[in-house]
Image (tube, helix red, strand yellow):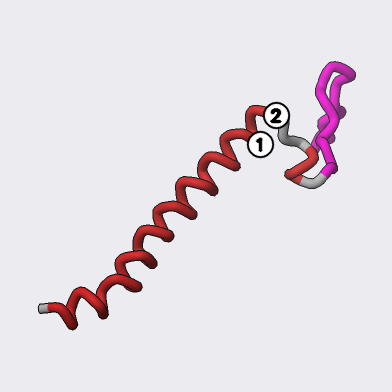
C-alpha cells in the first residue's frame, strides 16, 4: 500500500466558515433569494389576513 503525498501545487482546504468564503456576488444572490422567499411568504400571509373579512362579506 502506498500513501499519496500531496503535490505542492494542490491548494490547501479552506477551513474558514462558509460565510467567510463568499464573495460579493454570492452575497448578492443570497440576499435576492432571501427577499424572493420573504415576499412569496408575505403574499400568502396577506391572503390569510384578507380571508376572514372577504368571507364575511359573502
Residue 39, given in percent of the width and then of the height, sits at 44, 52
Mark 1 lies on residue: 27
Q: Main secondary structure of the magenta part?
A: loop
Residue 36, given in percent of the width and then of the height, sits at 46, 46
C-alpha separation, residue under disc 2 versus residue under disc 1: 5 Å
Hey, which quadrant is residue 6 in on the image?
A: top right
Q: As drawn, which residue projects farthest toward the front?
A: 57
**Pick the front one: 17 or 11:** 17
Tag 2 near tag 1, CB within 8 Å:
yes
Report helix, strand or loop for mark 2: helix
Mark 2 lies on residue: 24
**Pick the front one: 6 or 51:** 51
Report helix, strand or loop for mark 1: helix
Q: Which mark is residue 2?
A: none
Residue at x 86%, y 21% (from the top left corner): 7
Please provide the residue range marked out in magenta.
1-16
Hey, which quadrant is residue 29 in on the image?
A: top right
Location of the C terminus by quadrant is bottom left
Q: As drawn, which residue projects farthest toward the left?
A: 58
Residue at x 70%, y 29% (from the top left corner): 24
* Magenta highlight on residue 8: yes
Amino acid at each position: 500500500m502506498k500513501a499519496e503525498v500531496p503535490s505542492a501545487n494542490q491548494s490547501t482546504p479552506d477551513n474558514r466558515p462558509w460565510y467567510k468564503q463568499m464573495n460579493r456576488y454570492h452575497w448578492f444572490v443570497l440576499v435576492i433569494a432571501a427577499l424572493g422567499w420573504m415576499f412569496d411568504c408575505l403574499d400568502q400571509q396577506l391572503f390569510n389576513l384578507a380571508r376572514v373579512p372577504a368571507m364575511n362579506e359573502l
